[in-house]
Image (spheres, rainbow, N blue to C red):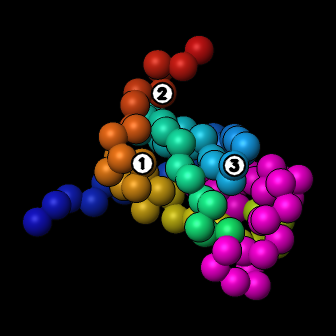
């Protein structure tokens, strides 16, 4: 049984191609591709507009958009880790 690491997002930056760079409170970071997520339905439809997608912010440790749509920080970290792209946050200047 694998252990789930409880983390919160500390910083988030929107990148081109519906990707987010997320820094977590355990001093790790990585990039997650949300190109499939933005196609899920009415709640994510506004995120298809790159200008709206770029308005992402952190609310209570969770990447969130002005329409209330958000992504789970724990799941985002697990997804990034599964791709092998999780790295120490200190690796970036």
Tell me what residue is drawn at x 72 percent, y 74 percent. 44
Disc 2 is placed on an element classified as helix
Residue situated in front as seen by the camera: 58 or 93: 93
In three-dimensional space, the C-alpha distance between marks 2 and 1, rounded to whole angstroms, equals 13 Å
Residue 46 quadrant: bottom right
- Closest to the camera, between mark 3 and mark 2, is 3
Residue under pointer 1:
80
* Magenta region, residue range: 39-64
Tell me what residue is drawn at x 68 percent, y 69 percent. 38
Q: Position of residue 93 (x, y in %)?
A: 59, 14
Asked if the magenta segment contains residue 75, the reply would be no
Residue under pointer 3:
17
Residue under pointer 2:
89
Disc 3 is placed on an element classified as loop
Q: Where is residue 90 in the image (x, y as percent from the top left)?
A: 47, 20
Other residues around mark 2 within 10 Å, as few (<14) / some (14–19) / many (≥20): some
Tell me what residue is drawn at x 33 percent, y 40 percent. 84
Asked if the magenta segment contains residue 51, the reply would be yes
Identity of the residue furthest to the top in this view? 93
Q: Does any portion of residue 60 appear in the rendered image?
A: no
**Vertical relation: 67 (above or below) 13:** below
């Amino acid at each position: 049984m694998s252990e789930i690491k409880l983390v919160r997002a500390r910083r988030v930056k929107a990148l081109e191609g519906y990707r987010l760079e997320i820094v977590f409170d355990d001093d790790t970071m990585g990039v997650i591709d949300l190109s499939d997520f933005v196609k899920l339905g009415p709640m994510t439809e506004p995120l298809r507009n790159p200008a709206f997608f770029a308005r992402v912010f952190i609310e209570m440790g969770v990447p969130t958009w002005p329409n209330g749509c958000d992504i789970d920080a724990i799941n985002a970290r697990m997804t990034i880790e599964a791709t092998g792209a999780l790295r120490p946050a200190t690796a970036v200047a």
